[in-house]
Image: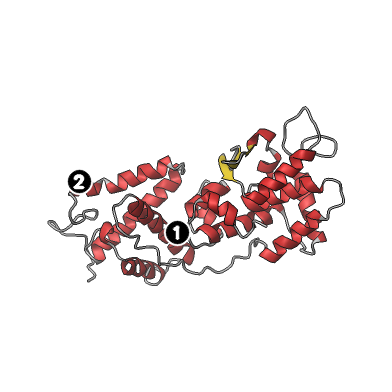
Amino acid sequence: MRRDGPAREGEAAPWSQPGVSESESQDTLPQYGTCLVESGLSEGTVKNYLGDIRHFASWLAHTHAKPPLTVTEEDIRSYCLELATEKAHPPATVNRRLQSIRKFYRYASDSALLKEDPSLGIKLLPQPRSKGPRGLTRSEVGRLLDAVRRGASGLAKRDYAIVQLLLQTGIRVGELARLRVADVALSEDKAVLKVRGQGTSHGREIPLSKSVQRAISTYLGERPSSRRDPLFLSRNGDPLSARSVQRLVNSYAREAGLGRVSTYTLRQTCGERLLRDTGDLSLVAMLMGHKRLETAIKYVLPKQKDLTEVAESSSLNL
């Protein structure tokens, strides 16, 4: 039964739950906030997550007189429906709130605060495709990679490693140009790319799939010797510039009959596929180096896996 006012004195506090003291229940949100901070999320992202959960908790208290840790799937559906209809929030806003709810209940389930995650069966609202850049389809990715493999420049192995990295890690072209040999760790138990933070870019480690590992290993086997340590070198042994990377991607895209494709197109492709594979907006935002969670909402999503598994099982792992 819906109520218009806040919970009255003597009624359940928003975070209390059966069998648990009010003081213990009130610790739930601060503990969750600590978990978010320790996971490496930015201060702004943590603030947004906690704000969304407080809003949901307040809505539950006012409309259903129940605390968040007794919520049902139907409660979450009702909340999202109200945001979309009565409040007229756009799909992106509703989906962001739902992502926050999903992340909290995944934490609550993993922490044994709940037996089951009530948010698992709830899908995100469809979003109209923006007029901005779109990612490549799987067949277009295949055509682009084939064009690079057929390259006759004598630098095809280097170029193939570059395109695979851009497609499967989503790094920015400037980040790629700044990579050093030491930023790539290719061991049997851990294969990662270290991306250095600069400007609007977050420093981070990105797991590498087997196909990216093979492409980089093959290139390193033929990489010209140089006193410099940039990962990617030009024919003359100089560091490869971001402009040169843009040009080579454009050239191979034309050879593949794809028209106007840029390094940003490859980044967009990676973001879209990772969100489709994981469904965890914060993980993908972190992996893509976004400082603001809202920036990553442009990709579109459904279901979580460990990022290392995602790198391996990604539909881009060709």
In this view of the protein, which residue sits in the foreground, 42 or 21? 21
Q: Residue at x 36, y 45 (%)?
A: 33
Q: Which residue is mark 2?
A: 23
Residue at image position (58%, 67%) is 129
Instruction: Locate residue 186 relative to residue 97 in the image: left or right.
Output: right
**Residue in view at x 64 percent, y 49 percent:** 210
Q: Residues within 10 Å of mark 2 (few under 14, many from 20)?
A: few
At mark 2, the secondary structure is helix
Q: Amino acid at mark 1?
A: Arg
Q: Counting residues from the N terminus, which is met first, the one under dot 2 or under dot 1?
A: 2
- Please determine whether, in this image, residue 281 is positioned above or below residue 239: below
Residue 245 lies, in percent from the top left, at: 76, 47
Rate crowding at label 1 as few (under 14), some (14 to 19) or many (20 or more) other CA atoms within 10 Å.
Answer: many
Q: In the picture provided, is 12 more to the left or to the right than 195?
A: left
Q: Is residue 111 left or right of residue 210?
A: left
Residue that extends furthest to the front in the rendered view of this protein: 188
Q: In the figure, 209 relative to 115: above or below?
A: above
The quarter of the picture where residue 146 lies is bottom right
Residue most toward the left?
10
Instruction: Provide residue 318's location: percent of width, then percent of height.
Output: 68, 57
User: What numbered label is drawn on residue 204?
Assistant: none
Between 316 and 26, the one nearer to me in the picture = 316
Which amino acid type corresponds to the residue marked 2 in the rendered image? Ser
Q: Which is nearer the eye, 199 or 287? A: 287
Tell me the quarter of the picture where residue 30 sits.
Answer: top left
Residue 284 in view (yes/no): yes
Measured Cα–Cα span from mark 2 to mark 1: 29 Å
Q: Which residue is mark 1?
A: 96
